[in-house]
Amino acid sequence: MRMHNADEHCGIAQAAVVTGDWWNVLVLREIARGHVRFDALAAELGLSRKVLTERLGRLVASGVLRRSLYQRRPVRYEYLLTDSGLALLPVLVAMQEWGDRWVLGDGGTTATASPQRSGGAEQARVHALASAGARLPAGLELPAADGTDHPVVAPDAAATVLFTSPGAYPGTSPGAEVHRPAGSIPEHRLFRDAWPDYRRAGVALRGVSAQPPYEQASVTRAESIPYPLLSDTEHRLTAALRLPTFRAAGRLHLKRLVLVLDRERTVRHALFPVDDIPRAVEDALHLARNTASASASATTTAFENRPQPQQ
C-alpha cells in the first residue's frame, strides 16, 4: 500500500497497512472462527492457494499470526492469532456491528434483532450456526465472575445452554438495579429460577455478556446466580460465532440470544431474536434435553458398534 509521508506517524494508516486488504480482513475473520488450517481457510474463503499463501505470509510477517506445526510428513501448519492478532478482534466485531447497523440495517439500535434491508442478516447468521453445525474453537475459555477461566462448553455435560445478554448492573442495595441498557436482568433471574430443572437434566448453563468480570461478580452476588457468568470483553466468543451486537453508553453489548451446544462444542439449536424471555428459558431446556438424549444415544451406538476382540 502506497502511503503519504504524513502517514508515517498515523496509527490508523499503519493499521490499514495490515488490515486494509479485503482478503486480510476475511482471513482474520475465519481464523477467529476456528478455521486455522490452510485447507479449511481455502474452502471457507474460496480463495486460490497462491493468493491465500501470500496473505497468510503477510499476516505472519506483520506479527498478527504465527505458524504452529501440527504435521511433519508432509509439513503442515496451523495459523494462530498472536497477542497482536487477538487485539484486532474488537476491531472486527466493531466492523460487523457497523455493517449490521448501517449497511444491512436501517441505522437503528436494539437489544434484540435489528430491522434489516437484507431480510434479516443477523437472524440468518445466527440460525446458520445451528443449520450448518458451527463448532466453537477448541479450548475456548472466558473469564468468569469468580476470577477463573471457564470453558464456554462444559466438558462434563451432555449439553450446554449458552445465553447472551446486554448485561446487568445491580445497585448498592439488594434487589435494587440500574439498567444500562434497561431491562437486561430478567434472563439472569429466570435462568436462576430454572436452574434446578437444568441441573436435573444434566444440562450446563452459561451466561455471557461483554461486561468485565468485576461487574458480573456484583450481579452474581446480588442475584445469587448459581451458574457461571462469563465475560467476553475481548470479543473472542463474539468473533468466533459472529454474534450480533449493538452499541450503547459507549460500549458494545451482546444482543439476547440462546444457543444449545453438544459436548463436541457444536451448535445444535439457536433461538434468536429473544423477545419472550420466559418462553426462551423453557424452550432452551426442552431443546437441551433432546440434545443430551441424542448425544447419549450416539455414544451408546458407538460403544455397541466398536470392533470386538478376537476370541
Image (spheres, rainbow, N blue to C red):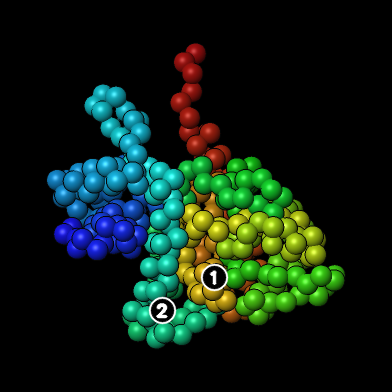
Secondary structure found at label 2: helix
Say which residue label 1 marks: 251
Neighbours of disc 2 within 10 Å: few (<14), some (14-19), many (20+): many
Q: Residue at x 75, y 62 (%)?
A: 218
In the image, taking residue 187 as reference, residue 270 lies left or right, namely: left
Mark 1 or 2, nearer chain start: 2
| Looking at the image, residue 207 lies above or below residue 276 | above
Q: Residue at x 60, y 42 (%)?
A: 155
The residue most toward the top is 311
Q: What's under tag 1, amino acid-wise?
A: Arg
Q: Residue at x 28, y 32 (%)?
A: 76
In the image, taking residue 46 as reference, residue 291 lies left or right, namely: right
Secondary structure found at label 1: strand
Residue 273 horizontal/vertical position (percent): 52, 75
Q: What's under tag 2, amino acid-wise?
A: Arg
Q: CA distance from mark 1 to mark 2?
A: 15 Å
Residue 172 horizontal/vertical position (percent): 81, 70
Q: Give 91 or 297, whichever is nearer the viewer.
A: 91
Q: Is residue 19 visible?
A: no
Residue 172's tag is none
Residue 289 horizontal/vertical position (percent): 63, 57
Tag nearer the camera, 1 or 2: 1
Say which residue label 2 marks: 101
| Looking at the image, residue 293 lies above or below residue 175 | above
Q: Is residue 115 visible?
A: yes
In the image, taking residue 186 as reference, residue 73 lies left or right, namely: left
Choose top left, top right, bottom left or bottom right for residue 9: bottom left
Q: In which quadrant of the rendered image does the N terminus lie?
A: bottom left
Q: Give 14 or 120, whichever is nearer the viewer.
A: 14
